[in-house]
Structures are given as C-alpha cells and as structure tokens.
Image (cartoon, rainbow, N blue to C red):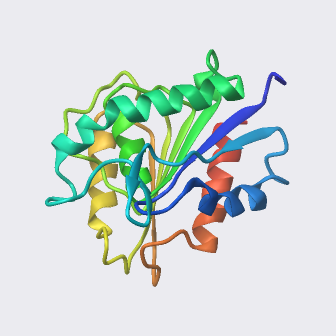
Amino acid sequence: MPSKSSLVIFLHGIGASGAQLMPLAASWRASLPITRFAAPDAPFSHRYGHQWFSTDGNPLDPTRIRAAREAFDGLMNDVVRAEGFASAHARIAFVGLSQGAIVALDAVASGRWRIGALVSFAGLLPPQQISSSSRDTPVLLVHGQRDTTIPVTASTLAAAELGAAGFKVELDIEPGVGHTISPSGGEKALAFLKQTLA
C-alpha cells in the first residue's frame, strides 16, 4: 500500500445497493489516482434492495439506528481489513447518501469511528450526545435546498451541533437541488476529499 493511499467507502441510500454509487468513484479516479474505492451493500435487506436500519414505523427512531450499529461496524471493519487499512483509519473517508449519510454521521459523532474525512449528502445527525473523541474528522455536509425527503434544516442543525462539539464542519446548501447527489455536489465532495486526504 503506497504511503499516501487512501480508502473511500460509499454508503448508499435506503433500498439501493453499493453498485449504484460506483459511477461516482469512476468519475473521481483521475483526481484521486492512488485512492481505493469500496461500496458495500448495507447489511439488512429491503424490498427494493438493502438498508442500514429498519424504517418501519418511525423512519428516524434513534433506537433503530443504535440497534444497527453493531452490523454497521462489523461490515466497515470487514471492508477496511479487506482493503488493507486496518491500521490507517486516518486515511479513510466515509461518503454517505441519505440513510448512508445518517449512519456515517452516527458512526463519527458517537466516537466509534475516527477517520480522515466524512461527506454527508442529504443526511441528518441522529439525536445523541456527540463525542469529542472523533472531532479530528473533518465533515462536509451537502444538502439540496429543495429536498423534500430529508429537509435541508437537518444538515444545518447537524453543522451547528458538530461545530459546537469541536468538529471542523463545512455546510454546502445547493439551490434548486432535491434529494440526490448533484454534479456540483459531487465536485465539492471531490475537492474536499483531495484536501482532507492529501
């Protein structure tokens, strides 16, 4: 493994699969030539694909997110070991969309994962006491102003809460964008990763 290599782990949205985020990796490879990319499927099945936690009933019930932590951590540890980064967590970035962003933010804010960078697209931070042990992880929150699935205020609130806990946070609100990763959002995330994983 080259000394400056890094690992980007994509975390997909509910009912999707890891493969659906790999085109983003393909578009980033030229700018991150020695970076490895992984996009695992979430550990739980969903009628349309996979999910990180169950959303039956209250889709944002914090107890469901906490109950899914063990499966999330196990899967991430498997990916990290397989890619050769078990002793190089500072060279790892999580890039999550929607439900994938929620579990990524939970993993870092809870102090379970101290990694090199976190990018959240259209996510939110589950209610919790934020641990300061992961505050060295820089965070980029990208959210479409026209998101009707998870309102943009979720990322605004997450930025305020993480910032108050000592995290370095960037918030990018995209006018006219809905619940998705826009081309401009992808470019902002790439620039952020080039800076934080350099």
The residue at 70%/44% (across/down) is: 37
Q: Quadrant of the N terminus?
A: top right
The residue at 32%/25% (across/down) is: 132
Residue 139 drawn at (x, y percent): 47, 44
Up-down: is 148 above or below 80? below
The residue at 79%/46% (across/down) is: 32
Q: Quadrant of the C terminus?
A: top right
How many numbered dots are placed on residues in this image?
A: 0
| Most foreground residue, 59 or 33 | 59
Up-down: is 58 above or below 115? below
Q: Is residue 1 left or right of 53 when viewed as pictured?
A: right
Res. 79 in view: yes
The residue at 41%/35% (across/down) is: 72
> Which picture quadrant has residue 196?
top right
Residue that sits furthest to the top in the current view: 87
> Which picture quadrant has residue 111?
top left
Res. 136 in view: no
Up-down: is 83 above or below 97? above
Residue 20 drawn at (x, y percent): 61, 63
Residue 194 drawn at (x, y percent): 71, 45
| Most foreground residue, 24 or 15 | 15
> Which picture quadrant has residue 69?
top left
Residue 149 drawn at (x, y percent): 31, 73
